[in-house]
Amino acid sequence: METQNEFASASRTTECDLVVLGAGASGVAAALSAARAGLNTVLVDAGPMPGGELISGMAIDGALNGRGEWIMGGVGREILAECESLGGYVGANCDWRLIWYVCLDPEFMKLAIARLLARAGVRLLLHTQATHVSVDGDRVTALHVRNKEGQLALRAPLFVDCSGDADIVAAAGGTVLRGGPGGEMQPVSMMFRMAGVDTERLLAFQHDHTESFALGESDAIRQGRTDRELAECAIRQGQPSVFIKGNGPLLSAAIERGEMYPTALIMIQPTSNQRKEVCLNTTRVGGIDGMRTGELSGTLSTLSDQVVQCAAFMRRHVPGFESAAFSGMSTRVGVRETRRIDGVQSLTESDVLEARKREDGVAKGSHHVDIHQSGTGQIRIPVKDGGSYDIPWGCLLPKGIANVVAAGRILSADRGAHGSARVMGPCLSMGHAVGVASAMLLQGKGRAPSYAQVDVAALRARLKAEGAVLDGTR
Ligand SMILES: Cc1cc2nc3c(=O)[nH]c(=O)nc-3n(C[C@H](O)[C@H](O)[C@H](O)COP(=O)(O)OP(=O)(O)OC[C@H]3O[C@@H](n4cnc5c(N)ncnc54)[C@H](O)[C@@H]3O)c2cc1C
């Protein structure tokens, strides 16, 4: 007769002030700001390392607007400062296409995040999967997690959902939305890096073959300049920040002859000037539901093949990469889109494109509406005049659940707005906002704190005092 024995059967309970689920960009920022404000904060993640896509090698989008002005301050900037103090910061770069982004070395970012969390006194629980919640009326009373030690109930008055999948909100009975109108989701990708890149040769190649690169896709970046003049700006910037477009002759011909897989882009961004290293954002598998573990795990082999294929293509066809070597890839398959909350307010595509400002804004975004599609498709629509828009507090409040707040790519938004606000700059700023709001609620000594009670004007004032950018900028 078959018997079942658990690896670990301990069942324990821990009390704290705040539980943050998910140690990606938003969760790290939320936990840091809450713990610094004095909250006993537990940060839970199923993975082995905090940081999410901050440690994958990709640059941080939506930290500056399309005119090169910072729109992310506060905790996000402090994380960057720590990375810089360790020597792993390249800095803000223009891609001479649509955006300014912040480039950094993911290996140093791992160190920066670990050190900051420890210094702030965040209680980090890695390798720990959240399994379910206990609910009493409109309140979550415990987040139940499981790890090698067994089952643990995390009891707290407040919970922050930074899971990227809205796990707490969905488990508590909140309404969640999935992907596009037919439930379709953006493709999953594997970020990888190559070292030993000759930047001068790469930028000269772009200058002489502008037809293969994406340049000046917004008026704010183009400013009446020709592609060649924009390529000259890139040479003056002196960083390997270029975007090989899927419909340009270089890449489309390679796709046609089967030398490359169908893709909309090979986006190249510097990660380390010392190692002459860049990150490449190009691989993709479409038609995947990132919450189906078997399906997601099954993409690893295809994505790994694409990494090998692209590295060979780069060495063979792109000047500057002749002697470059594969130097690493992300520790996880990157998931752009799964579930998001249905909030008290919802950010719209028109809010984003019109750069709409709000009195109840608690974070800013500036990234274009950026929806990757399967194969060679990608929607890219710039924000008006290279400006920024505000994310209202209500976009982080799930309907009907009093003591749970959301941050990161699960904010309440229509699909177009999600395509913009999902990037890491706004995720860090939203995390900062929910961490500070949690501290304000608990310091208010109310018996049953609810995120709907937050005094948004006071929250904005406190965020600004901590360096957040909430006014302006265009
Ligand atoms: C391939 C790709 C390319 C991108 N390119 C860029 C770019 O160039 N620049 C940019 O700024 N943004 C980019 N983005 C978007 C951006 O990186 C993400 O949207 C953002 O990092 C999401 O952060 P988050 O904190 O909301 O969620 P995540 O980073 O997804 O963090 C969620 C965390 O929650 C944990 N978790 C989830 N469920 C559970 C559970 N039940 N129990 C325990 N732990 C759980 C996960 O392990 C994960 O660590 C890209 C995304 C992808 C995937």
Image (cartoon, rainbow, N blue to C red):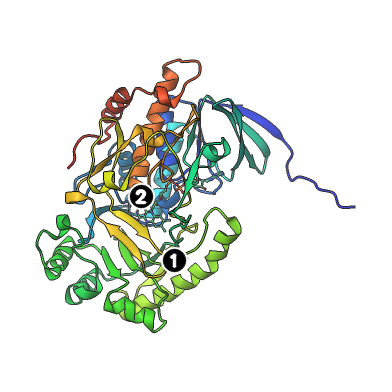
Q: Residue shown at 18%/64% (left/top)?
A: 234
- Which quadrant would residue 75 be assigned to in this image? top left
- In this rendering, position of residue 52 left or right of residue 359: right
Q: Residue shown at 36%/80% (left/top)?
A: 254
Q: Closer to the camera, 386 or 274?
A: 386
Image x and y of residue 99, in percent: 24, 55
Q: Residue shown at 34%/42% (left/top)?
A: 347
Looking at the image, is 238 positioned above or below residue 386?
Answer: below
- In this rendering, position of residue 157 left or right of residue 465: right
Q: Amino acid at mark 1?
A: Arg
Looking at the image, is 205 positioned above or below residue 56?
Answer: below
Mark 2: few, some, or many residues within 10 Å (few <14, many ≥20)? Answer: many
Q: Alpha-carbon distance for marks 2 and 1?
A: 17 Å
Looking at the image, is 109 positioned above or below residue 316?
Answer: above
Label disc, if present, on residue 284 of the rendered structure: 1
Visible residue check, residue 115: no
Looking at the image, is 1 positioned above or below residue 429?
Answer: below
For the residue labelled by badge 2, is the local secondary structure a helix, a strand or a loop?
A: loop
For the residue labelled by badge 1, is the local secondary structure a helix, a strand or a loop?
A: loop
CB under 8 Å between discs 2 and 1: no
Image x and y of residue 341, in percent: 46, 41
Q: Closer to the camera, 172 or 228?
A: 172
Report whether the residue tagged 2 is closer than 8 Å to ligand 1.
yes
Mark 1: few, some, or many residues within 10 Å (few <14, many ≥20)? Answer: many
Label disc, if present, on residue 423 of the rendered structure: 2
Image x and y of residue 262, in percent: 40, 73
Q: Earlier in the sequence, mark 2 or mark 1?
A: 1
Visible residue check, residue 206: yes
Q: Amino acid at mark 2?
A: Val
